[in-house]
Amino acid sequence: MGEWESSGKLKVRSGKACNHWELYREDIELMAKLGYPAYRFSIEWSRIFPEKDKVDNDALNRYREIVDLLKSMGSSR
């Protein structure tokens, strides 16, 4: 949640959007079933570095799991 959202300056909260962070396994499995030959994703650096000079190893491990699953499904391009 961003600064504006947490301060109450926005009337509507953004929510979890598609919630890929938690549903990545199901999403990647669906992409494989649909025959997607590749998948492009981005890294949310604020997950990895939630505070100055602090690394969230759980977030790094989650990204590693995502990449490993993509590779196992044949979408490593």
Image: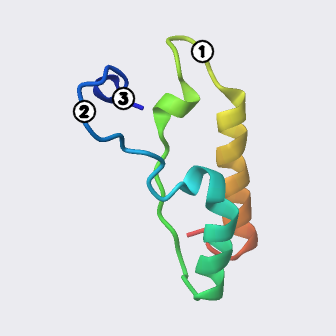
Q: Is residue 15 left or right of residue 23?
A: left
Mark 1 and mark 2 in contact? Answer it, CB < 8 Å: no
Between label 3 and label 2, give the one nearer the viewer. 2
Question: Which of disc 3 and disc 1 is earlier in sequence?
Answer: 3
Does dot 3 land on a helix, a strand or a loop?
Answer: loop
Does dot 2 land on a helix, a strand or a loop?
Answer: loop
Q: Position of residue 18 (x, y in %)?
A: 48, 59
Asked which quadrant contains residue 55, the reply is top right
Q: Work out whether 24 lies above or below 75.
A: above
Asked which quadrant contains residue 60, the reply is top right
Marks 3 and 2 sit apart, C-alpha to C-alpha, by 10 Å
The residue at 64%/59% (across/down) is 23
Q: Which residue is mark 3?
A: 2
Question: Which of disc 2 and disc 1 is earlier in sequence?
Answer: 2
Amino acid, disc 2: Leu
The residue at 63%/60% (across/down) is 24
